[in-house]
Amino acid sequence: MPKKDLLSYIREGRTMSRGEKLRLIVQLSIPSILAQISATVMFFIDASMVGHLGEKASAAIGLVETTTWLLGGLGMAASMGFSVQVAHFVGASDFEAARRVLRQSLVCCFLWSLMLSTACVIVHGVLPYWLGGTADIAPDASLYFLIIGVAGILFQMGGLAGSMLKCSGNMKIPSALNIMMCCLDVVFNYIFIYMMDMGVKGAAMGTAAAELVTAVLMLYFLLWRSDMLGLFKGGRLKVKGGRLKVKGGRWTVEGGGRSSFRPSADVVRTAFKIGAPMGLQHLLMGSAQIVSTIIVAPLGTVAIAANSLAIAVESLCYMPGYGIAEAATTLVGQGIGAGQRLLTRSFAYMSVGLGITVMTLMGVLMFVFAPELMALMSPVDHIVSEGAAALRIEAFAEPMFAAAIVCNGVFIGAGDTLRPAVMSLASMWGVRLTLAWWLSQTHGLRGVWTAMAIELTFRGFIFLLRLCQGGWNRKFVTKS
């Protein structure tokens, strides 16, 4: 049965068999998993390109990598604050309310990304030194961060459009465009890094160019082509109570209505309620990652490079979990919007089970092939051996890491973000960083990764506990 028909069962309140629910989860997950794996493979190739420039180039990017993740997390939090509302309204079949949220999200998220990019411009020169970088890698790290930070506006708007499409049930288009972005990233990187001999700067330029193309296409498919959320139809922009049309080079309203692009208190308040805990979580989690980088930095250039490249390899394992989590967010969001509590809970449990199964298998493969995977990333023997040892430690945490990832996707779909954020922060700061500092003193990089594995296992356990308690499944959308 087509995916679209199964999704409509949620909105129509129809009964679904266990097989139909599993099929829908898999159908929604596969495009996102493929996109996540593709992104990881392309990042793998990307990091390998830089890695073959030498350990200093890898260390320069690795030094600011966690900070760029922090920026991406803050952007995603803003997007999800609005797209979760859209998922709820789509589940309730209130498509006008969903488009109302979309219009306001475009304005709010653009302004938010502009603020973040401005902050990047201000701090890029001193950031590498704050992170413990030395003078031999700081200039490249600073320039890389500056370019990626300015391109964050593109990442924000493309990510918002993709998130909106996914929450409406369209996983194929954003997943296909993300795969395309990864391919473009490799092509542009090859051009800028090797053909134009721009080194680390070329890696950042390649990523920015790929994000530009993807953001334009993602917005096109959302605003012009989406049946549920498209704002532009036949050259006109639909607005509440009328239509906004171009006349003489100016936007004018037809039909007596007024545009709702201006942020309204109810939408922004709900977005803040959903997104602020996520933003705080990403801020403090990203800060914790930065602290982790500071812990690794004194261990030397080899440790910094091995840590960065091992993280790239490990993402091969956990990206399928994020793909399944995105499907869970969509299904739970629409299920809650439709008022189907039992169906929503069933989707949540089955999604988490699928995520744990997939990532356990990926963890086994990572453990077995860790040396070969690291050898693809760097020709330096010390980097390969250190990175492979770290990956084999991390492999044991993958099942519970999957539980944490997919449970978080469930909670986001339900709009339940505050308590999971507090749990993540307590786990990261109270367990990982404390253990990482302590173990790094005697076990170096392997001690840092041992702390990471212990913390991810603990986090997965407490997230499963919250999932089973069911407090997240008490929220229902109110139609506007």
Image: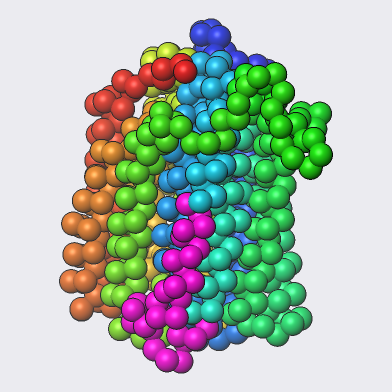
Q: Is residue 363 above or below residue 149?
A: above
Q: Quadrant of residue 229?
A: top right
Q: Residue at x 74, y 40 (%)?
A: 250
Magenta stretch contains residue 322: no
Q: Quadrant of the N terminus?
A: top right
Picture colour scheme: rainbow
Say which of 418 and 298 sits in front: 418
Q: Which residues are magenta?
A: 112-141
The answer to whether residue 422 of the structure is visible from this angle is: yes
Magenta stretch contains residue 131: yes
Tell me if 91 is positioned left or right of 390 in this view. Answer: right
Q: Is residue 194 above or below residue 85?
A: below
Q: Residue at x 45, y 26 (%)?
A: 332
Say which of 295 and 112 sits in front: 112
Q: Is residue 425 above or below residue 146?
A: above
Question: Can you give x and y, in whole percent of width and height, for residue 467 in the image?
Answer: 30, 30
The answer to whether residue 372 of the structure is visible from this angle is: no
Question: Can you give x and y, in whole percent of width and height, for residue 319 in the image?
Answer: 51, 50
Q: Quadrant of residue 385?
A: bottom left
Q: Residue at x 57, y 71 (%)?
A: 147
Tell me if 392 is positioned left or right of 25 in this view. Answer: left
